[in-house]
Image (cartoon, rainbow, N blue to C red):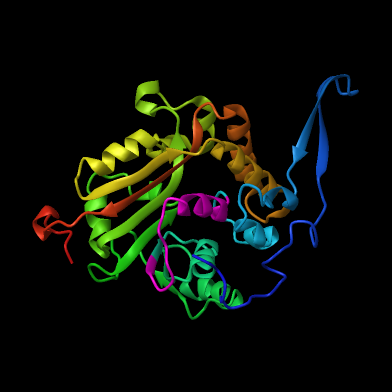
């Protein structure tokens, strides 16, 4: 799984040394609660700088990538941290064919090609293939990453095509339906790997009886697609379509998400109101309910008769 021999890319985007060429900009903003004159309790809010996204101790591979480049491609929580952690449960080898499902602007696809030497098909509905291809060309992986516009329920690939299908912060939008696992695993070779990183919960919302208010204020009903690691394990294993290798909740996934959101607020160009709502949600939660689930599985060897009619290709 060595990255040696990969095509070099501009140093302005990647291969940042953790002790040099870093932007030192940690901002402390005082927030005063109390009288207009400033009397009251002062909360010091540390607004994460780009340096907070360089963490070689926890994420050595991701720390080689310029965080400014990553923030410029923002479409959700730090994709490389999620992918690097998820990859610890995967067996990715050079030459494998991998589908990056819901690839967004393509940071995860660049990471897969550079770090593992795999051939990547980057499929996304909302990002144009031309825009994604420009990212891949600039990163020096245009020959190994193919941009595809595709909807997750109508994928334009043949059966048994991929060695691995990976989805980073996207599967919750289309993959919680009971029938979806049977659909997506058609595109995996027998023994192929399925891996997702998706917003997760420490307890099922059904067991809580309602969506916690601080989560509801940010994402509304969409949180019903966020589940526990145990939910995902059962959801996949009960089908007998796959054998689950791992289903785990990140211990500090909520905090990683918070660092990313603060950096995007400070340095990004996204919707500030939406980012501030995410920050408020995560600060209020403080790890009580929120994190990320990382789940991996291998496709079992089964006959076509196990697939529901209408979902075969």
Residue interval drawn in magenta: 78-98
Residue sitting at x 79%, y 56%:
19
Percent x, y of residue 160:
24, 67
Q: Does 98 appear above or below 140? A: above
Q: Quadrant of residue 214?
A: top right
Residue sitting at x 22%, y 48%:
179
Q: Is residue 209 visible?
A: no
Percent x, y of residue 4:
57, 72
Q: Residue furthest right?
A: 37
Whether the magenta-drawn stretch holds residue 149 is answered as no
Quarter of the image containing the C terminus?
bottom left
Compare residues 30 and 146 and report the one nearer the observer.
Answer: 146
Q: Quadrant of residue 229?
A: top left
Percent x, y of residue 192:
30, 60
Percent x, y of residue 301:
18, 57
Residue sitting at x 63%, y 59%:
70
């Amino acid at each position: 799984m060595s990255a040696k021999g990969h095509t070099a890319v501009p140093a302005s985007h990647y291969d940042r040394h953790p002790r040099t060429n870093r932007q030192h900009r940690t901002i402390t903003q005082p927030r005063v609660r109390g009288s207009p004159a400033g009397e009251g309790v002062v909360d010091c809010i540390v607004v994460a700088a780009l340096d907070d996204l360089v963490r070689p101790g926890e994420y050595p591979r991701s720390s080689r990538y310029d965080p400014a480049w990553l923030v410029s491609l923002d479409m959700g929580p730090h994709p490389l941290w999620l992918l690097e952690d998820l990859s610890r449960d995967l067996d990715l080898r050079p030459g494998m064919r991998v589908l990056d499902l819901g690839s967004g602007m393509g940071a995860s696809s660049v990471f897969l090609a550079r770090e593992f030497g795999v051939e990547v098909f980057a499929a996304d509905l909302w990002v144009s293939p031309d825009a994604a291809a420009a990212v891949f060309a600039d990163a020096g992986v245009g020959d190994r990453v193919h941009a595809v516009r595709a909807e997750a329920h109508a994928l334009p690939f043949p059966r048994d095509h991929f060695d691995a299908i990976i989805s980073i912060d996207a599967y919750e939008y289309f993959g919680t339906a009971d029938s979806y696992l049977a659909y997506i695993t058609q595109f995996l070779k027998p023994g192929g790997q399925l891996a997702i990183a998706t917003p997760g919960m420490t307890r099922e919302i059904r067991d809580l009886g309602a969506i916690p208010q601080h989560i509801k204020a940010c994402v509304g009903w969409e949180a019903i697609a966020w589940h526990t690691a145990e939910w995902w394990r059962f959801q996949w294993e009960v089908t007998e379509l796959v054998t689950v290798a791992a289903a785990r909740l990140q211990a500090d996934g909520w905090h990683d998400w918070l660092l990313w959101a603060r950096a995007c607020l400070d340095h990004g160009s996204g919707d500030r109101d939406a980012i501030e709502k995410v920050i408020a949600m995560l600060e209020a939660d403080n790890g009580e309910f929120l994190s990320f689930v990382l789940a991996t599985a291998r496709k079992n060897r089964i006959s076509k008769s196990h697939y529901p009619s209408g979902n075969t290709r």
